[in-house]
Amino acid sequence: MIEELIQSGTKARSRSIVTAVIDGIAHRKLAPGQKLPPQRDLAHDLGVAVGTVGRAYAELETQGFVISHVGRGTFIADRRTARTQDAPQSAEPIDMAVYRVPVPPLDDLFGETLKAMAAEHRPDQILGSAPTAGRFEHREAFAHWLKRFGVFATPDQIVLTNGGQHAMMAAISTITHPGEVIATEDFTDPRMKMVVSHLDRRLVGIPIDQYGLLPEALDQICRTQAIAAIYCTTRSQNPTNITLSLERRQAIAEIARRYDLPVIESDVYGTIMADVDPPIFALAPERTHFISSLGRIAGPGMKIGCLVSPPDKVAQTQSGVGMSTGAATLIMAELGSRWITEGRIDEMIRWQQAEVLRRVSLLTTFPVLGKAHAIPTSPHVWLILPEPWRAEEFVGAAAAHGVTIAPSHSFVVGRRSVPHAVRLVIGSPPSMDLLETACERLERLLNTQPRIHGDTA
C-alpha cells in the first residue's frame, strides 16, 4: 500500500501514510512483525519531510498498529499481544447483533449547526410541516450529493424520507401490490423482510455467489413465476458484504427490461465506498428506484434519506411517503442538506472510512475471525463457521460467553436451509477495547468444540 502511495506521485501527508498502513493491514498485505521502511528512506521516496513520516509513525504507534524499537526500526504490531492485561472488561453482553455504525466525533459542529438553523429560520420553518417530497432546496442538495454515486437525477425525481427503511417501505408499497412476489438475494436484510411481511408481499430468493445475484437464476424465476419487482443491494450487501460486479449490474438491468420489471436498488450500506462502476439506476434509469440515506455516515440517529425514481413514477412513490410516516422532518432535512452543502458529510465519510478500517484491521489479526468476508468500508462481516459449528449453536454459545449475535435464519429468504455462517457487526461495540474483547471471546470459542445438549435416546 505504501508502494502504491509512492507510485501515485501525489503529495503525501501524514494522514495518507497512516491510512495506507492501516489499509495494508486490513487487506492482509502487512503482517504482524513486518518492518516498515526507515523514516528517512520513506520520506525520500515520497518527497516529503522526515517530520511528516515521523508524525505518521507516531500516530500509528499511539493507535497500536505499529511498535518502534530504538535502533531496530518500526514494525507492524500484533495488536492482541500488545494489549495490556488489565484492559477494561464489560459486565454487560457485548452487542455484535444490532446493525450500528460509530457516530463521528462532531465536537462543536452539531451545536453550531443548530444555532445557525435557529438564527436563520423561524421555529415554524424548522418544526412545521413540509411538502411530501421535501423542500426543493433540500432535494437540490441531495441531488448534488448523489452524483458521487453515479446517480444523476433532478431534484424533481427525489423524495426525501425519514431514513432508508422509510424509503424502502414507500417504494415497495407503491410499486407492488399485496400478495405479489418480489425477487431478491436469498440472503437479505432482515428489515427488508419485515417491511415486505408487514405490507403483505412475498419474497423469492435468488442464489448468489461472490459476484452477487446470479443472472441466470433471476432470469429463470422471472420466466417461470409472476414477479412484481426486483430488489437488490448493489454495494456492501447485508449480510454477505458482496458488491455486485459491473457485469451483474448490466445483466440485472437487461433482465428487468426483458420482463418489464421495476428495480428497487438499495445503497444504504455502500455510502462510504469508492466505486467506479455505475449503479443500476444509471444503466436502467427508466425503471430503477434508488434508495440512500445519511445514517450510515453521520450515525443511526440521522434519520434522513431519499428515494429517487424515474420521472413518470415520482408521484406514485411520493404517495407511499405520505401514506406511511409522512414527509421527512424538516429539522433532519435541513441538518442533512447543510452538512452536504458545507462539505461536512465528506468529512464524516473520511472519518467513517478510517474508523471501519481500524476495526477491520483488528479483526484480521485473529487466525479464524480473520477469515471472515470483511471489506475495509463495511461495519459488518460474514463469517463461514469452521467444522463442526452450526449457526444456531454458535449464536447460543456466543451469548453464553457474553457476545450477542443476530440469529442467522433472520437473513434467509424462504425455506432454504440456514447457512453455517454468522454476521458480526464490528461497528456496534462502542470502543476498540470492547471490540477486541468480543473478538477474543469468539476466537476462543471458534477453537473449541460445540457442547452437545439434550436427552439421549
Image: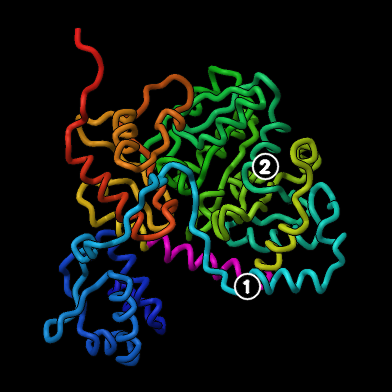
* Start-end of magenta stretch: 341-357
Q: Secondary structure at mark 2?
A: helix
Label ID, residue 217: none
- Residue at the image point whose x is 21% and y is 62% from the top: 85
Up the image or down, 151 lies above or below 442; here it is below
Residue located beneath label 1 in the image: 109
Residue 28 visible in the picture: yes
x and y percentages locating residue 135 in the rendered image: 81, 57
Residue located beneath label 2 in the image: 166
x and y percentages locating residue 62 in the rendered image: 31, 75
Q: Amino acid at mark 1?
A: Leu
| Quadrant (top left, top right, bottom left, bottom right) of the N terminus | bottom left
x and y percentages locating residue 317 in the rendered image: 75, 39
Q: CA distance from mark 2 to mark 1?
A: 27 Å
Residue 215 visible in the picture: no
| Quadrant (top left, top right, bottom left, bottom right) of the C terminus | top left
